[in-house]
Image (cartoon, rainbow, N blue to C red):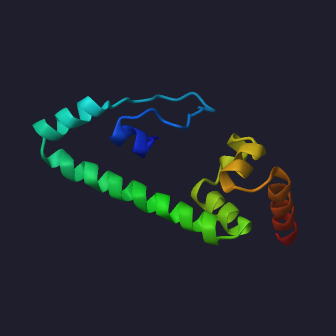
């Protein structure tokens, strides 16, 4: 998890991260990353690949939020994270999908009726 803008500009982040489960976190500071890039030039390639992957996922999410329906967003979330409904409160899932809790409940109800 990273606030890309905050990390690369070295400015305070505007968002927070809340862990819902026990987790192990790894930290890589800006200075450490710069040292790795200097000491291991091949890591520049890895860093670029990770950045490309992150930005492609970000663009996909932005496009889906702008152009996709709530049902499409919900279905993609279930496809990519099938156990999310059992692990995360529905109001948080709704917020992530940019829909109201009530709208998410309607979507889930409609899908249960069709199966």
* Image quadrant occupied by the C terminus: bottom right
Give coordinates of residue 94: x percent, y percent.
Answer: 74, 51
User: At 57% from the left edge and 58% from the top edge, which residue is drawn?
Assistant: 80
Count of numbered tags: 0
- Name the side, left or right, on which 85 lies relative to 13: right
User: At 59% from the left edge and 32% from the top edge, which residue is drawn?
Assistant: 19
Where on the picture, by quarter, is residue 91?
top right
User: At 34% from the left edge and 58% from the top edge, which residue is drawn?
Assistant: 52
Give coordinates of residue 104: x percent, y percent.
Answer: 80, 57
Q: Nearer the viewer, residue 47 or 10?
A: 10
Give the answer, above or below, for where 44 lies relative to 22: below
User: At 60% from the left edge and 32% from the top edge, which residue is drawn?
Assistant: 18
Where on the picture, by quarter, is residue 8?
top left
Give coordinates of residue 83: x percent, y percent.
Answer: 65, 49
Q: Nearer the viewer, residue 102 or 30?
A: 30
Give the answer, above or below, for where 110 lies relative to 34: below
- Name the side, left or right, on which 91 lies relative to 57: right
């Amino acid at each position: 998890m990273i606030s890309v803008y905050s990390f690369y500009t070295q400015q305070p982040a505007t968002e927070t991260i809340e862990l819902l489960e026990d987790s192990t976190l790894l930290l890589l500071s800006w200075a450490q990353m710069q040292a790795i890039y200097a000491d291991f030039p091949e890591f520049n390639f890895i860093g670029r690949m990770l950045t490309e992957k992150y930005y492609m996922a970000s663009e996909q999410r932005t496009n889906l939020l702008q152009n996709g329906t709530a049902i499409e967003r919900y279905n993609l979330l279930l496809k990519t994270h099938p156990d999310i409904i059992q692990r995360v409160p529905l109001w948080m899932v709704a917020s992530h999908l940019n829909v109201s809790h009530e709208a998410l409940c309607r979507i889930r109800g409609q899908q249960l009726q069709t199966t």
